[in-house]
Image: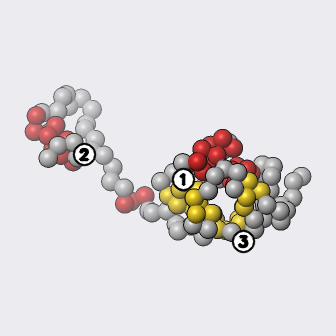
Amino acid sequence: MTQPTASAVRIDVWLWAVRIFKTRSLAAEAVRAGHVKIDGKAVKPAAQVVPGETVRVWKDHRELILEVAATVTKRVGAPIARSCYIDHSPPPPPRELFAAPPVRDRGTGRPTKKERRETDRLLGRRK
């Protein structure tokens, strides 16, 4: 079993090992795209991360703020992965804030011109 260590590790490897990203290539792609910052600075996938640093990750339309507690080079189980970082992320917004799209009743046929214009206006397609 791989135990957490205190040495420096590549950021893409660490993000994959602690299960933030499903694959290492997805982690590297996110780092290259600028979605990962170490102590406020955009970095390359080969940048080293050590315990005590703050890693900000933009993933799934929310920001994760992680403090590195331990480094690992191999992918570990979820309980060990959670012990390798301290999560300072704000809680996700409640689901009630997202409005459901309008739904037409089945069998009502095509929308009238007035209904289509209202739907377009609601979805921001027209003025």
Marks 3 and 1, how far apart at CA:
21 Å
Q: Are marks 3 and 1 in contact (CB under 8 Å)?
A: no
Identify the residue at image location x=64%, y=47%: 27
Identify the residue at image location x=30%, y=46%: 101
Q: Position of residue 18 (x, y in %)?
A: 72, 55
Q: Position of residue 121 (x, y in %)?
A: 18, 46
Q: Are marks 2 and 1 in contact (CB under 8 Å)?
A: no
Identify the residue at image location x=89%, y=52%: 1
Residue 83 can be seen, yes or no: no
Q: Amino acid at mark 2?
A: Leu
Judge the density around disc 1: few (<14), some (14-19), many (≥20) Cα neighbours within 10 Å: some
Depth check, mark 3 against mark 1: the one in front is 1
Which residue position is annotated with label 1?
34
Which residue position is annotated with label 2?
123
- Local secondary structure at mark 2: helix
Q: Is 52 rendered above or below residue 92?
A: below
Identify the residue at image location x=27%, y=32%: 106
Marks 2 and 3, how far apart at CA:
45 Å
Q: Amino acid at mark 1?
A: Gly
Depth check, mark 2 against mark 1: the one in front is 1
Which residue position is annotated with label 3?
52
Q: Quadrant of residue 88?
A: bottom right
- Local secondary structure at mark 1: loop
